[in-house]
Amino acid sequence: MRRDASSPQFDIDQPTIARVYDALLGGKDNFAADREGAKIYLKHVPDAGKCAIDNRAALVRGVQYLARVAGIDQFLDIGSGLPTVKNTHEAAQEINPDAKVVYVDNDPIVLAHGRALLASNESTTVITADLRDPEYILAHEEVKSTLDFNRPIGLMIVGLHMHFHDDEQPDEWVRTLLDACPAGSYLFITDFVDTGDDLQKSIERAGLESLGNGWIRTPERIREHFLGLPLIEPGLDFLERWYPEEPDREVPDADKLEPYQRILMAAIGKKE
């Protein structure tokens, strides 16, 4: 892994999205404040840890589709969190050892830990940046030297949209990134959904109390995140029903899912 010259600074007394998520996944790269944040999620949604695990499993399935079926060999993973507990680079490089991955996260500890975790992986790098500044991401030397934007990119915004209020217009940040990607690229998103379930409202309360963000959105609003891109089969669906490599797989009816299995939806759109 190529390295930034800078040494990131971070505040371990404030919970962050990446580290709370790591705590919910059962990881070890978190601090007391993050574990307290995870406890708030678990107070409101006792199966929040299962939601985090299911989201990571869906990430792996999406990357496997992109690498094996779509032939994508370079990935830009925004809001990636800590690169542990099987993440994008492992899922992609198991299929194509030459696949390139750039992780982007606004938590500096992701860079600090990524340096150690990925020190021997020359095809994967980590940068500290924020989705709010897509121009900075695109201009970053690590991004430009790792990814070839003349060839299709797998742009990943997995488990991130919920942390931005619609008033911030997060779709416009994604549009800037997607505009830089050529035809044949893909946009992969998971997000908290609002279909009227009480537990969905509870995950929103947990996020607002723990991190100050974490809004749920209707399926119609989530589809707007894809900026008009056609969705690959099976379209936008709950994670437990979403298997892009097996779109005809027999899956449970939505109303047969456990309540925690109706908190997140996923989809992949293709830029044509």
Image (tube, grey):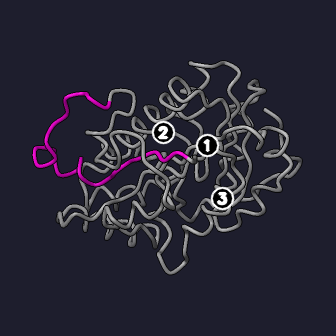
Q: Which badge, 1 or 2, is on the more N-terminal residue? A: 2
Q: What is the span of residues highlighted in magenta in the rendered image?
A: 247-270
- For label 3, the crowd category at 10 Å Cα-Cα, with few meaning under 14, some 14 to 19 and many 20 or more, is many
Query: Rounded to the nearest whole Å, what is the CA distance between mark 3 and mark 1?
Result: 24 Å
Nearer the observer, disc 1 or disc 2? 1
- Type of residue at label 3? Asn
SS class, disc 1: loop
Q: Quadrant of residue 37?
A: bottom left
- For label 2, the crowd category at 10 Å Cα-Cα, with few meaning under 14, some 14 to 19 and many 20 or more, is some
Q: Which badge, 3 or 1, is on the more N-terminal residue? A: 3
Residue that appears at 38% across and 72% down: 209
- Type of residue at label 1? Ser
Please check the rendered image and state whether residue 248 is part of the magenta-colored stretch, yes or no: yes
SS class, disc 3: loop
Q: Which badge, 3 or 2, is on the more N-terminal residue? A: 2
Q: Is residue 105 visible?
A: yes
For residue 4, which numbered disc appears in the image?
none
Q: Position of residue 41 (x, y in %)?
A: 33, 59
Which residue is the site of mark 1? 185
The reply, left or right, for residue 209 in relation to residue 241 is right
Please check the rendered image and state whether residue 202 is part of the magenta-colored stretch, yes or no: no
Task: Evaluate if marks 3 and 1 touch, with contact meaning CB atoms under 8 Å apart.
Answer: no
Q: Nearer the viewer, residue 55 or 238?
A: 238
Task: Evaluate if marks 1 and 2 touch, with contact meaning CB atoms under 8 Å apart.
Answer: no
Q: Quadrant of the N terminus?
A: top right
Query: Rounded to the nearest whole Å, what is the CA distance between mark 1 and mark 2?
Result: 31 Å
For residue 27, which numbered disc appears in the image?
2
Q: Position of residue 19 (x, y in %)?
A: 53, 51
Which residue is the site of mark 3? 106
SS class, disc 2: loop
Residue that appears at 50% across and 25% down: 69
